[in-house]
Amino acid sequence: MHGALDALLVGLVGLATLLATLWRGLAPRLGIPPLVGYILIGLGFGLADEALALFSEPARFAFELLGALGLVALLFRVGLGSHPQRLLEKLPRASLIWLISVAVSGLAGWAAARMMGLGEIASLVAGVALTATSIGVALPPWQEAGQLDTEAGTLALDVAELDDLSGVLLMALLLAAIPTLQAAHGIAWADLATTLSTLLLGLAAFTAGCWAFAHWLEPPLTRALERWETPPARLLVVVALGALIAAGAGLLGFSLAIGALFAGLIFSGAPEGVREDRSYLVLHDFLVPFFFIGIGLKLEPAALQSALAVGAVLLLAAVAGKLVGTWLPALLAAPAGTALPLAVSMVPRAEIAMVVVDQARRLGPSVVPDTLYGAMTLVTLGTCALTPPVLGRLLARGGPGGRLRG
């Protein structure tokens, strides 16, 4: 019997990997981001499980573990692709758009959730989730239009990176505050201030440790790896260190997501031969789909009907929040005629938004009920499917390097 369970588990992992790989090859031809298909694969597994009882407890645990590794791989790459020094240099120009965009989209998400009858904490989760954008969804249309290296393209990239970083940090603050908010009858401001100040001090210490590692240990380490190790081996050392940093952050109460992001930032200054190693991309492409498959697998089919109405309202809030919150400041801070494409680029919600919801859900159904989980998944599917074609048309209208209307 044990052998049959092992065989079933290996078969499920193999089937998930095969479907994800086939979809990843097909998605660009359809103009749909791969993560949309990954979530639908997970939903299909969930429906099959209801009919055939495929997922035993060990199988669900295995998919949870693969999903956690996928989360680490996802956030590690987000950090790896960020350039802290470049972001600091661009901050004076990008900060106006970033701050207003985050504030407006967060308030829009919170208000929409409250309007649909969700609780205060669930509404805060929705608001924080909707502050972040998806750089991976917005980037391809800029690349295809040959405008990623223009002033407007680099500004879109900078604002999206800041959105992602602030989304993860806001998630850390929210997750730390939720137990205090749950325990209080009303908001116990003193307890909340103590909790958040403790977290911020801990994050400051963790950040200082990561900076010291990046400043003094990372350069000689990567030089040694380039000199003595073959590409797969040196990449595995970097990934192993990243996993240890992520695990350390999780044990300290900051979550795996924070640790993985910081680990990626540590190695973001490494030589390109280390950062762009194909071995890591293979590992990334294997693990990351399991995070999104896990999201689809956790969806309760019975809750999808009730999630439709909430999802529709949150989708409107997600689109309006980023369009208004980005377009208005972009009129002042962006190159002339590029405000609208910049605003549309911030609309998709994917990786960070679902990381926020998924991590908050671990605190219980009172924090993220099935309705909100399903609604936010619909927001992800909707914004990621609709944004690329709209943005592509806007950029094509301006022509390569041409003036865009905004």
Image (cartoon, rainbow, N blue to C red):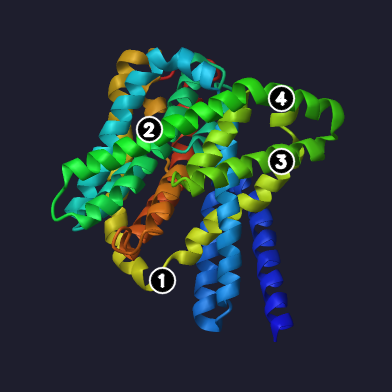
- Lower sequence index among marks 3 and 4: 4
Residue 78 place in picture, x, y as percent: 55, 36
4 or 2: tag closer to the N-terminus: 2
Please state, as top left, top right, bottom left or bottom right, where the C terminus lies in the image.
Answer: top left
Labels 3 and 2: the sequence-earlier one: 2
Depth check, mark 4 against mark 2: the one in front is 2
Q: Which residue is mark 4?
A: 272
Position in image of residue 322 (x %, y %): 33, 34
Camera-nearest residue between 251 and 147? 251
Residue 387 drawn above or below residue 39:
above
Q: CA distance from mark 4 to mark 2?
A: 33 Å
* Count of residue discs: 4
- Circle number at residue 301: 1
**Picture residue at 53% right of the left edge, 68% below the top:** 44
Residue situated in front as seen by the camera: 195 or 161 = 195
Callout 4: helix, strand or loop? Answer: helix
Q: Where's residue 142, x and y in %?
A: 53, 28
- Between disc 3 and disc 2, the foreground one is 2
**Percent position (x, y) of residue 262?**
53, 34
Q: Secondary structure at mark 1?
A: helix
- How far apart are the alpha carbons under marks 2 and 1? 41 Å
Residue 38 located left or right of residue 390? right
Type of amino acid under label 3: Tyr
Q: Which residue, given by chain and number where applicable, does mark 2 sit on?
A: 201
Q: Amino acid at mark 1?
A: Pro
Sequence-wise, the earlier of marks 3 and 1 is 3
Amino acid, disc 2: Leu
Q: Are marks 3 and 1 in contact (CB under 8 Å)?
A: no
User: In the depicted view, which residue is nearer to us: 59 or 48?
Assistant: 59
Q: Earlier in the sequence, mark 1 or mark 4?
A: 4
Mark 2 vs mark 1: in front: 2
User: In terms of sequence position, does the residue under pointer 2 or pointer 1 come before the other?
Assistant: 2
